[in-house]
Amino acid sequence: MRSLRGVFRLLEDFLRSSLLYGVSIFLLFTTVYSLVSSNSNQWTFFDSPSGQIVPLRPIANHQGKNTHPNSLLSQQTGNQVMTNGPLFVHPTNPRYFSDGSGQAIALTGSHTWCNFMDCGSSDPPSVFDYEGYLDFLEVNGHNFFRLWRAENARGGETGDNFWFDPMPYQRPGPGTALDGKPKFDLDLFNQAYFDRMRSHIIEAGQRGIYVSIMLFDGWSIESKMPNHDPWRGHPFNGSNNINGVNGDINGNGQGEDTHTLANPAVTALQEAYVRKVIDTVNDLDNVLYEISNESHGNATEWQYHMIDFIRQYEATKPKQHPIGMTVEYPGGNNDELFASAADWISLNGDINNPPVADGSKVILADTDHLCGICGNYQWVWKSFTRGENPLFMDPYDPSFTGRGAPPGYDPNNPNDVSLRLNMGYTHSYAERMNLAEMIPRGDLCSTQYCLANAVSSGAEYLVYLPQGGTIQVNLSAASGELLVEWLNPATGAVQAGPPVMGGAARSFTPPFSGDAVLYVYAPPTSTATPSPTSTSSATPTNTPTHTPTATGTLTHTPTPTATATGTLTHTPTPTATATGTLTHTPTSTRTPIITPSATVTGTLITPTSTATGTLTSTPSQTPVLTATVTATPVVCNTPTPTPSVTPVGGTPTSTPTGEPAPGYFLFLPVVIYDLPPDC
């Protein structure tokens, strides 16, 4: 009996030590994993088309909305994760795009030169902070950017010592190219290049951002300024490839011939590249194509050919995406853009007097083609109220001097900060208005900058006052009472004005000095029943790469009847304040901006801002993490274990704007033997 007791005692000690040790390690691992996962804000998934592990950002919250920290931006519905199919030209208002939702979609955003291929004055160039760039776009309320490509491996606008990486072709040699590296094999694609393209677009789509893929670049084939010689680093330069391809047919030491149809071998290589791009991204919804950035004035027929080629090849694929043509430089002619088969175009012209979009093409008005490194927020509103979709070629990073950034550029200069924010403000109004019915109506207002849906019921007018002062708006088509809202574009502050009656021309004067945006709209007719309201608190933290300046405290009271109130204090870098009151409920089918419903308490981690306050959210689960280990005694002569199974349930810490990360439930069987001392 004593021998048996000793055996059981040894067994008891072994089981206690090993089992409790294992349980402790397991619980420690799961706790650390949940904390790391939630705080890093980074998940991955296996992307079967590319065979890559791709970062997965959780959507902003349970309604796919983001809370922007900058005054007016804090009210907008936010970028939606793409679930409605690719864009296509809106059937009744072709100034804008649409998708499977039927809503009209306006595009706006900042684009910068190194957002796809790393570029810089070192070899290899430093890696571009793409996540930080997406954070930057989200903070500013943008929903679009151009994904830049350089065709050459070496040679910037200020000299030869500027590099681009990765390239679409492998470089196995034999032989050495002009940049001192092995020559290109134009029959061998570099899969890492296309994997990066796909993952970048997926990550943007996770944030509700559309991406236009730049297929070719006119600044990569010929000199367009002193000390600029990109052709030396181009794969189609006869000295740089093993395939015998020479893109310089006329022998002038430049590659402008490659953007013509003069060399069938080059055209075939370009078509193969386009097919590879389409094969890489065709299943993604947030894709647009741009044939080329500022090819020379004789490239028109080549661009037309590429538009037709893309359309024909995508017709054999599950999805079709919009195709764009941007104005040529030098020698660009806007008439050639309107005559093209492109879905969208970017014009040259006078930035101070944008053309009125007539609906023959979707116009993405880009400072790149209007004046280069230029623009201000006043242009943004002039462009938007004339039916265009404003884009900003953003220097963004002062290290990009070899690609376009002015020497000594400060990304937080007040002009560019306000320009970016006001693009986000236009996006906010585009989301709130019945954009499908809004057309440029300069004849209805004395400033001639007016988008309007001038109808008896559901009328809306969005008017820009470049000089402030008193404005006349013809409301004759509208009937009944109309609500009035003022936006101060210099500060982002929103302020309600006294209602007016339709049926006649009315005068309006902003309640502040300087330029102003006036929004006059019919009261909403729909109602909503609010869910029970409760509050949660959270403290998001992070430091963005470039934080725009905004000032503001904004109180918003939506109508329908669902009402939520809260105080949000945000401190971007740098900071300021604005105050305002906004009352509005969209007349479209979109979800009201604030829909209080349930309670969540937790810590929010966000890559864009630092905020404290009282928030209202509707999480799908309440964060909880519990674990219980139970010991069940057994008698000496019945050594049968009794397991105690206790669920361990919970969710990782909330994601940046209130959405609980995907929940998990783990059933942990815990078995403990407990032998009485006298066994």
Image (cartoon, rainbow, N blue to C red):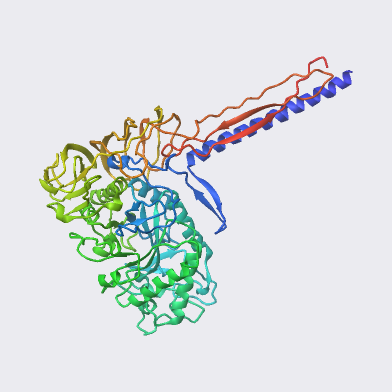
Q: Picture coordinates of residue 130 (x, y %)?
A: 42, 53
Is 358 in front, or is 110? 358
For residue 48, side relative to residue 397 (left or right)? right
Count of residue discs: 0
Q: Is residue 299 visible?
A: no
Q: Picture coordinates of residue 315 (x, y %)?
A: 47, 67
Q: Picture coordinates of residue 383 (x, y %)?
A: 23, 56
**From what the image shows, is residue 283 above or below residue 275?**
above
Q: Picture coordinates of residue 640 (x, y %)?
A: 80, 24
Query: In the image, what residue occupies the spot 46% across and 34% down?
Result: 619
**From what the image shows, is residue 485 above or below residue 84?**
above
Q: Please, which residue is most extreme toward the top here?
A: 678
Name the quadrant of the C terminus.
Answer: top right
Name the quadrant of the N terminus.
Answer: top right
Q: Is residue 587 visible?
A: yes
For residue 247, side relative to residue 637 (left or right)? left
**From what the image shows, is residue 15 above or below residue 678?**
below
Residue 386 occupies which quadrant of the picture? bottom left
Residue 366 occupies which quadrant of the picture? bottom left
